[in-house]
Image (spheres, coloured by chain):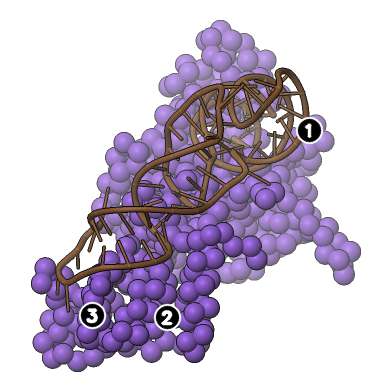
Amino acid sequence: MELNDLQAQRKIKLDRLRESGLNPYPASSARTHCVAAALEQFETRAEAGTSLTLAGRIIGARRVMGKIAFAHIEDGSGSIQLWISRAEMGDVLFERFRDDIDTFDIIEVTGVLRRTQKGEPSIFAHTISVLAKTINPPPEKWAGLSDVEERHRQRYLDLIVNSERRAIFRARALAVSTMRRVLDSRGFLEVETPILQPIYGGAAARPFSTYHNQLGQSLYLRIATELYLKRLIVGGFPGVYEIGKDFRNEGVDRSHNPEFTMMECYQAFADYRDMMRLVEDMLREMAMAVTSSTLVPFQGHELDFGCDWPRIPMAEAISTHTGIDIAQINELGALQSAITAANLKVERKLTWAKQVDELFSEYVQPLLIQPTFITDYPVELSPLAKRKPDQPSFTERFEAFIVGMEIGNAFSELNDPFDQAQRFLDQLKDFAAGDTDAHQMDADYINALMYGMPPTGGLGLGIDRIVMVLTNQPSIREVILFPHMRQRED
RNA sequence: GGGCCGGUAGCUCAGUGGUAGAGCACCUGACUUUUAAUCAGAGGGUCGAGGGUUCGAUCCCCUCCCGGCUCACCA
């Protein structure tokens, strides 16, 4: 292990501690209180003068004078000033603090609570010991660690130094627990389904591949939980959900990480309208839990989760923003002519449905700032959704958008096994034609549908993106503890 | 993948075709109420990597690596 100068300095101190017969990494701590508890009980304990033991990391500067010294320690619950006097501690302990204990070391302090002359609540120590000697030095005192790459690669350091970062991940946990509470209270059963799957499905995406050595079998990391969860609805559970990672072998950017956290839930005897109400209720509760308000600031916008979300059929949204009525123009050539006639600049696609989607992505989606449902997607784009009874080329489906990001996708689940089989066959044709995101045939899923699945509403929500919105973070990497980073050569 | 921007001390950043700079941190010394402690002094560099041009490259050119923004892709 090669050490730089600053690390070597600290190693010398570590060796000195050992030479004094001390263990710089003892097995346990004799802490009696967390800092928050000590501060809560400060006045009564200070008056009584009873001793207590606190432990934590030294943060900020140590202020060491000839016979007195100050520092702050932090333990995850709060921070408190440490106050040391040579007269009180004796030369040995005082000089150990001065010479062998550094900022960022994790230490244990026994003493009494007392205010300084300036009035700051402090622990006036009579003994001090090291719980964990640190080798790496802290970043700059004021600018801290700001390099984005280093913050993500060394998240542990980011969390130590930038306390607001810890608040974001607490908010994330709160958002997820709120989601879980809403689902549990409505009778959904939390389940776990395979991440390693012989056939991937449930979304349009490219998978990661892996291999099981003993079975000699190719496996995929799941891109969605959908098809397994619906098998459980067939199996008789009235409602199920799963919160877990999905994996998609696609580009990485501000709103995409190769692995991301998805919540999917399915409710028997419900449909996509029920799912819309569920989304509205869930996001309202999550916003309240995280921000204590239904009005959430995001990058200069104020998002309103307090009211029902607009429900706009996709055809209407496209018509409004481009003047093109896809309900009337239902053939690729005519659609592309209309696009040209309207002087719209979109990439040409190979099918009518994909051209519609392109038009939507380009001219509608970026405008969907406030929470909005876009409904009734073309059946070709929705191989797992039930057709609209009055409009069979469109489906009972919606996607949920906030600040131009898709945060959710839901539909009335297709339960006609013959229609489903035909949709899979159509997807296979797309795949053969070069659509790398097309679905695979899942014969076992068809077999499950042939045992009968009740009318079912299904929903998927992208948790990372929702957390971005609720915590006002512009990049998905800021809400993922360890976002994917390209490997460094070093 | 394309375009733009960046990578210099542990951290945050300046900088120049001619011996590499600052602040903080660290080290030594002084200091009995600090909280950006103060004062005095010292040390610390593969200037992302490789190649080229040049008498001489951290600087100019080329290639590559890593990141940020953006476009494309990913409905």
Q: Position of residue A71 (x, y in %)?
A: 29, 69
Report the front residue among B54 and A150: B54
Q: Earlier in the sequence, mark 1 or mark 3?
A: 3
- Residue A432 shows in the view: yes
Residue where numbered disc 1 is placed: A434
Q: What is the C-alpha distance between the residues marked 2 and 1?
A: 62 Å
Which colour denotes chain A? purple
Outermost residue on the top side: it is A341
Disc 2 is placed on an element classified as strand
Q: Chain of mark 3?
A: A
Residue at screen point 16% across, 86% down: A45
Q: Nearer the viewer, mark 2 or mark 3?
A: 3
Disc 1 is placed on an element classified as loop
Q: Position of residue A361 (x, y in %)?
A: 53, 29
Give the chain ID for the brown colour: B
Residue at screen point 69% across, 49% down: A489
Residue where numbered disc 3 is placed: A85
Is residue A283 rendered to the left or right of residue B38? right
Q: Amino acid at mark 2?
A: Val
Report the front residue among A448 and A178: A178
Residue at screen point 38% across, 56% down: A162
Report the front residue among A132 and A62: A62
